[in-house]
Image (cartoon, rainbow, N blue to C red):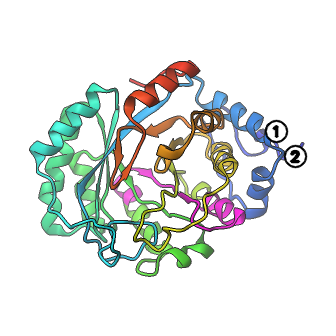
């Protein structure tokens, strides 16, 4: 068994030591014998999340397609031929209907995503209205709108936005193989503005894009070295979309997904680790392993932006079979 113990990196429950992780340290955790890794992840999960419940989060695409960026995984990039057509921002009435529906099936957080490189000031009033709709119905609000200015971040906070999502996607070294139109430092700068404005951070990445194991670990190093650490960390499994540069990517070994989740749980002990995109092709058994490894949030509902997701009934049935309750 590895000599890297949980106690070396964490203080008492709900108090995380300010520590700078290295790639070597995280790789030592990532490559532990699988039973030891799962045991350590469960130990941290029970220490920091003793309630053992799953948080359900719904994601709605509020503005389809037309994005000028070249993210190799994304069907909403205008330069790729994926059949996605650019549309206008959804109205508040349409969004409200979706929020009501999400609440009725048990979601407690409602996330909204727009296919933009950055938020434009002209769209800010409409975005503020959508935030208020979500908050008025008692759900946590989260948005992902691309890059923000300082003024925009403050405006979102003042409107009541609780979480802002801006993923780093992958390791610093592999990032340039996936995206050329925005740097990872650009993303980190936006996260800094989100923090400075007083919002909570939702930030994670994608596995299965052809990266190496070291890249997955390096991505987690970047996340763990953000201080404060992100309150929410989505782990996405690539769902290869025809027409994107990654349409023929080799599927990732399912156990690598579990290792990524378990390592994230250990070095990001207080965060909600959210299993996000790519779940529609995951077996019940793989879901169960990820939950055991420390996942305590899932994106919930039949669609995630432009890709499919397991039906809500399937998710609730599996949680019931596993005896896992839901937050709410």
Q: Quadrant of the C terminus?
A: top left
Q: Residue 289, image x and y in percent?
A: 65, 36
Which of the 4 image quadrants contains residue 35? top right
Residue 231 in view in this figure: no
> In the rendered structure, does residue 209 fall within the stretch colored magenta?
yes
Q: Residue at x 47, y 23 (%)?
A: 317
**Does residue 225 lie above or below 187 as drawn?**
above
Q: Residue 91, image x and y in percent?
A: 11, 51
Which of the 4 image quadrants contains residue 87? bottom left
Secondary structure, mark 1, is helix
- Determine whether label 1 and label 2 are within 8 Å by CB: yes
In the orientation shown, which residue stands out farthest toward the bottom?
A: 180
Please name whichever residue, 293 or 21, is drawn nearer the observer in this view of the structure.
Answer: 293
Give the extent of the magenta segment.
194-222
**Does residue 166 lie above or below 265 as drawn?**
below
Secondary structure, mark 2, is loop
Q: Quadrant of the N terminus?
A: top right
Question: Residue 88 has which mark?
Answer: none
Q: Residue 25, image x and y in percent?
A: 78, 57
Question: Residue 2 has which mark?
Answer: 2
Alpha-carbon span between mark 1 and mark 2: 8 Å
Q: Residue 243, image x and y in percent?
A: 40, 71
Q: Residue at x 61, y 64 (%)?
A: 250
N-terminal label among 1 and 2 = 2
Residue identified by numbered label 1: 36
> In the rendered structure, does residue 224 fall within the stretch colored magenta?
no
Please name whichever residue, 91 or 130, is drawn nearer the observer in this view of the structure.
Answer: 91
For the residue carrying disc 2, how many other residues have a C-alpha within 10 Å: few (<14), some (14-19), or many (20+)? few
Residue 195 in view in this figure: yes
């Amino acid at each position: 068994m590895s000599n890297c113990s949980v106690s070396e990196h964490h203080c008492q429950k709900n108090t995380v030591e300010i520590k700078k992780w290295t790639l070597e340290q995280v790789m030592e955790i990532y490559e532990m014998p699988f039973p030891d890794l799962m045991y350590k992840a469960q130990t941290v999960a029970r220490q920091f999340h003793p309630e053992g419940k799953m948080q359900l989060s719904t994601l709605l695409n509020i503005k389809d397609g037309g994005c000028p960026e070249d993210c190799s995984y994304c069907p909403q990039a205008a330069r790729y031929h994926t059949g996605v057509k650019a549309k206008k921002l959804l109205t508040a009435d349409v969004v409200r209907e979706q929020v009501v529906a999400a609440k009725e099936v048990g979601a407690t957080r409602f996330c909204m995503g727009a296919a933009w490189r950055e938020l434009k000031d002209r769209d800010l009033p409409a975005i503020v209205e959508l935030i208020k709709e979500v908050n008025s119905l008692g759900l946590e609000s989260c948005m992902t709108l691309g890059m923000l200015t300082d003024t925009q971040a403050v405006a979102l906070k003042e409107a009541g936005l609780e979480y802002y999502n801006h993923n780093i996607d992958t390791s610093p070294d592999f990032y340039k193989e996936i995206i050329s139109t925005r740097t990872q430092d650009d993303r980190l700068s936006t996260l800094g503005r989100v923090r400075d404005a007083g919002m909570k951070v939702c930030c994670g990445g994608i596995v299965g894009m052809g990266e190496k194991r070291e890249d997955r670990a390096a991505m987690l190093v970047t996340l763990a070295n953000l201080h404060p650490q992100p309150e929410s960390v989505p782990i996405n499994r690539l769902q290869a979309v025809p027409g994107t540069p990654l349409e023929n990517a080799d599927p990732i070994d399912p156990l690598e997904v579990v290792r990524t989740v378990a390592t994230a749980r250990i070095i990001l002990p207080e965060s909600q680790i959210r299993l996000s995109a790519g779940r529609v092709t995951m077996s019940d058994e793989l879901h169960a392993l990820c939950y055991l490894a420390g996942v305590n949030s899932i994106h919930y509902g039949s669609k995630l932006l432009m890709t499919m997701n397991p039906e809500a009934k399937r998710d609730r049935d599996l949680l019931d079979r596993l005896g896992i309750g839901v937050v709410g």
